[in-house]
Amino acid sequence: MNCSFLYQPASLWKISLENRKRNPSSRRLVARFRSLQGCGAGAWLESVPTSLKFALKPADFCLATRLRLGCDMPLASAIDKCDCGQPNDRNGSICYHACKHRGGPIWTHGTVVNVWAECLQDLKITHRKEPRELYDGANQCRPDIVYFDTQSGCDVELDISIAHPWNGDAVSLASREDGAAASKREQQKSMKYSQLFDVFGNPSNCIPVVMEHFGRWGQRAQQLLHDLSLLAVDEDGQSNSRDFTVYWRRCLSVALQRSNARVITRKLSRLEIHYSRYLAKQ
């Protein structure tokens, strides 16, 4: 693969707006680079694998790096369509991660939710994951984590989601504005949970925690981690907010990239099976 473009990143931003409108690939290219420049997108590259939380298997690291650089994925061009019927993309398109066939996005979402729960556990904050007994039937609003905020004296709902900058019409906005995919998802979640006011008679205290597929964090996710870091103290009772922020930002970043790699691995294993069948027919 010709990687000479990696040494001329400035040239990528010379793509005219008119060209982006005409060429979906150009819009995706710019949207990906905008997402990669955001907070948290490169935290997994700063992590030293001193524990399992920071460790990536060699194959997972290779696939995560390919995804970050926009390199072609193995076997991706051998099969025209995904199992869901959508066309495959050589460098790991949205179909690798947003395709609901065999639960790829659900698995990634669950992995990230578990790490946020561990973050709360580290602060000894009482929390519950997916409290079905309280929210089932509430206009389909069910947060992923609910914890008790001692400062406000009320429950805080966390709705965690992964937004893809290439999903639907988001690519057009994401190619023009930094963090547009995460911002749009935050607005959608906030409007959704405002319905809880009508159900329970109390205003919703929901925080939409959004991370973009390429690693960028939404504004509310950044603010949540900052607020939680203020509660962190070391063994001597001194503030430990900076170390706490760096530690959990890297943990979450590694977890997301590990999930991305595993989803791609599952997709490629199915492509290999289809490709073998294709060759057998020739």
Image: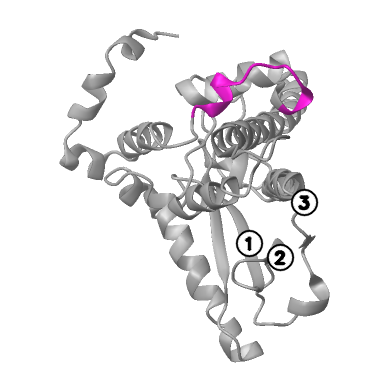
Q: Which residue lies furthest to the right in this view?
A: 133
The span shown in magenta is 42-53
Other residues around mark 1 within 10 Å, as few (<14) / some (14–19) / many (≥20): many
Label located before the other in sequence (3 or 1): 3
In the rendered view, tell whether residue 206 sits above or below residue 75. below
Q: Where is residue 162 in the image (x, y as percent from the top left)?
A: 57, 49
Q: Where is residue 250 in the image (x, y as percent from the top left)?
A: 60, 31
Magenta highlight on residue 43? yes
Image point (62%, 49%), residue name? 231
Q: Residue 225 — which label?
A: none
Distance, label 2 to label 1, CA atoms, is 6 Å
In the rendered view, tell whether residue 168 sits above or below residue 134. above
Distance, label 3 to label 1, CA atoms, is 17 Å
Mark 2 belongs to which amino acid?
A: Val
Residue 126 in sight here? yes
Label located before the other in sequence (2 or 1): 2
- Comparing 87 with 167, the one in front is 167
Residue tagged 3: 124
In the rendered view, tell whether residue 157 sits above or below residue 228. below
Mark 3 belongs to which amino acid?
A: Lys
Looking at the image, residue 67 sits to the left or right of residue 13; the answer is right
Q: Position of residue 156 (x, y in %)?
A: 63, 67
Residue tagged 1: 158
Q: Residue 146 — which label?
A: 2
Describe the element under mark 1 as helix, strand or loop. strand
Is the Cβ of the residue at disc 3 closer than 8 Å to that at disc 1? no
